[in-house]
Amino acid sequence: MVAGVGVLGERLNGINWFDAVGGAVSDESNTLSEMQHDLILSLYQINASQLQGSGFDFQLLLPDDEEPLAHRAMELTNWCYGFLFGLGLGGESVMDALSEEAEEALHHISEIGQMDHESIESTEDDEQAFFDVCEYVRMGAIMIFTELCPEREVTRVENDDSTIH
């Protein structure tokens, strides 16, 4: 979600993205703990920083390679879902701003988010295919950001407390 919001830059149209993202991760009382609050802000700042640079520093937040492939694939589908959710906060203006190539990448990210991760085996070929798919998603997210924020201006969110837990 945070990465999807990050590629929107100034296109949030007055939507409080933090409330939307926070609502998706809060507990039954709809409140975030201080630690959750700080973590979301930290993740946003990391993504923003990675995207503002050359863009190629941007990394998907996924489990390490030591984790089973099926688990990493499940987390990739979750990442794609969250990216689309965050990007959706920008409304229809986001789709209007994207080139045909970026729309196609967005469509593919949506399809990847629906992959059957339970049928994936830990073969060398599947590992390579997973790496390739992750790289495609990463480059697609960078392309979408580049089109939505051509001057690489990402909304900066200041944390009230500079301590990150």
Image: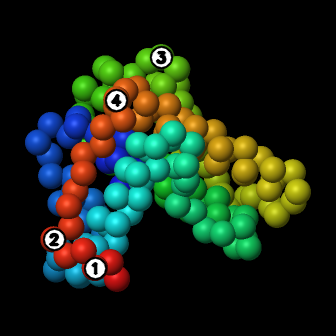
Mark 4 vs mark 1, CA separation in Å: 30 Å
In contact (CB < 8 Å): disc 2 and disc 3: no
The residue type indicated by label 3 comes to Glu
Q: Secondary structure at mark 2?
A: loop
In contact (CB < 8 Å): disc 4 and disc 3: no
The residue type indicated by label 4 comes to Glu
Q: Is residue 33 left or right of residue 61?
A: left
Disc number for residue 151? 4
- Given the current orientation, which residue lies at the most extreme left position? 14
Decide: few, some or many residues near mark 2? Use Cα within 10 Å; few <14, some 14-19, many ≥20.
few
* Residue under the image location 75 percent in, 58 percent down: 120
Mark 1 vs mark 3, CA separation in Å: 42 Å
Disc number for residue 100? 3
Mark 4 vs mark 2, CA separation in Å: 27 Å
Q: Where is residue 21 drawn, in percent x and y?
A: 27, 59
Residue 115 in sight here: yes
Location of mark 2 (residue): 160
Q: Earlier in the sequence, mark 1 or mark 3?
A: 3
Q: Earlier in the sequence, mark 4 or mark 1?
A: 4
Closer to viewer: mark 4 or mark 3? 4
Location of mark 1 (residue): 163
Q: Earlier in the sequence, mark 4 or mark 3?
A: 3
Closer to viewer: mark 2 or mark 3? 2
In contact (CB < 8 Å): disc 4 and disc 1: no
* Residue under the image location 41 percent in, 35 percent down: 145
- Given the current orientation, which residue lies at the most extreme right position? 124
In contact (CB < 8 Å): disc 1 and disc 2: no
Decide: is 132 above or below 126: above
The residue type indicated by label 1 comes to Thr
Disc number for residue 83? none
Q: Nearer the viewer, residue 57 or 3?
A: 57
